[in-house]
């Protein structure tokens, strides 16, 4: 039997912002529905259903501890909420016209190149450009706004 999720798992170009994703249910199983937005950051792994199963599988959680006592079974350190906040801020900033980027002229020139240059041959993946944009946003743009300052304070206190 055909399973579109596993037959055609890739929905997006590696060179553009992800615009759709396969929906997963609460157990990590594909629902065969495509959601027309970027998936929120979360730690879940889609696993094919076993042929025989005694009870409904439950996705186990991860303890993000690194031996530092940050997480326990009762209280979990959750990096995904901050990742999603930063992504939202960077997405909003990315959509602004160049005159509103609030970056140095050299940074603006680099952003213009990475975002709009007609690359021949090897060109950067979206995730690479997004990583640089995030670093730029955190260092040059976030300190200039109240939500950005609050986010930086949260990261500094973590």
Image (cartoon, grey):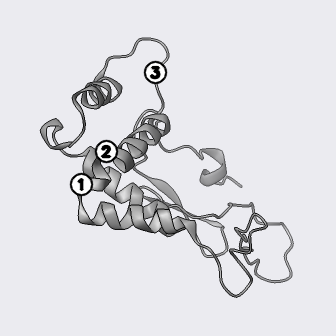
Give me the disc on residue 123. 3
| Residue shown at 61% from the left, 53% from the top | 5
Report how far apart the C-alphas of labels 1 and 2 lie in the structure: 8 Å
Residue 37 appears in the rendering: no
Q: Quadrant of residue 64?
A: bottom right
Q: Quadrant of residue 89?
A: bottom left
In this picture, is 79 found above or below 60? Answer: above
Say which of marks 1 and 3 sits in front: 1
| Crowd rating for badge 3 (residues with CA inside 10 Å; few <14, some 14–19, many 20+) | few
In this picture, is 66 found above or below 127? Answer: below
Q: Secondary structure at mark 1?
A: helix
Residue 45 appears in the rendering: yes
Report how far apart the C-alphas of labels 1 and 3 lie in the structure: 31 Å
Q: In the image, residue 25 lies at what x, y percent?
A: 59, 72
| Crowd rating for badge 1 (residues with CA inside 10 Å; few <14, some 14–19, many 20+) | few
- Residue farthest toward the bottom in the current orientation of the protein: 74
| Residue shown at 46% from the left, 21% from the top | 123
Q: In the image, residue 44 lies at what x, y percent?
A: 65, 64
Of marks 1 and 3, which one's residue comes earlier in the chain? 3
| Residue shown at 71% from the left, 74% from the top | 61
Which residue is the site of mark 1?
144
Q: Secondary structure at mark 2?
A: helix
Q: In the image, residue 119 lies at what x, y percent?
A: 38, 16
Tell me if label 1 and label 3 are in contact, CB under 8 Å. Answer: no
Give me the disc on residue 140. 2
Say which of marks 3 and 2 sits in front: 2
Report how far apart the C-alphas of labels 3 and 2 lie in the structure: 25 Å
């Amino acid at each position: 039997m055909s399973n579109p999720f596993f037959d055609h798992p890739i929905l997006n170009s590696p060179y553009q912002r992800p615009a759709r994703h396969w929906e997963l249910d609460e157990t990590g199983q594909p629902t065969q529905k495509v959601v027309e937005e970027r998936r929120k950051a979360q730690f879940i792994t889609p696993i094919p259903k076993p042929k025989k199963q005694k009870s409904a599988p439950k996705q186990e959680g991860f303890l993000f501890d690194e031996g530092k006592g940050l997480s326990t079974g009762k209280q979990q350190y959750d990096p995904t909420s901050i990742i999603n906040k930063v992504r939202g801020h960077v997405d909003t900033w990315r959509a602004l016209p160049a005159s509103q980027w609030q970056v140095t002229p050299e940074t603006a020139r680099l952003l213009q190149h990475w975002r709009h240059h007609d690359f021949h041959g090897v060109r950067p993946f979206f995730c690479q450009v997004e990583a640089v944009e995030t670093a730029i946003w955190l260092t040059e743009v976030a300190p200039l706004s109240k939500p950005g300052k609050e986010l930086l304070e949260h990261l500094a206190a973590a």
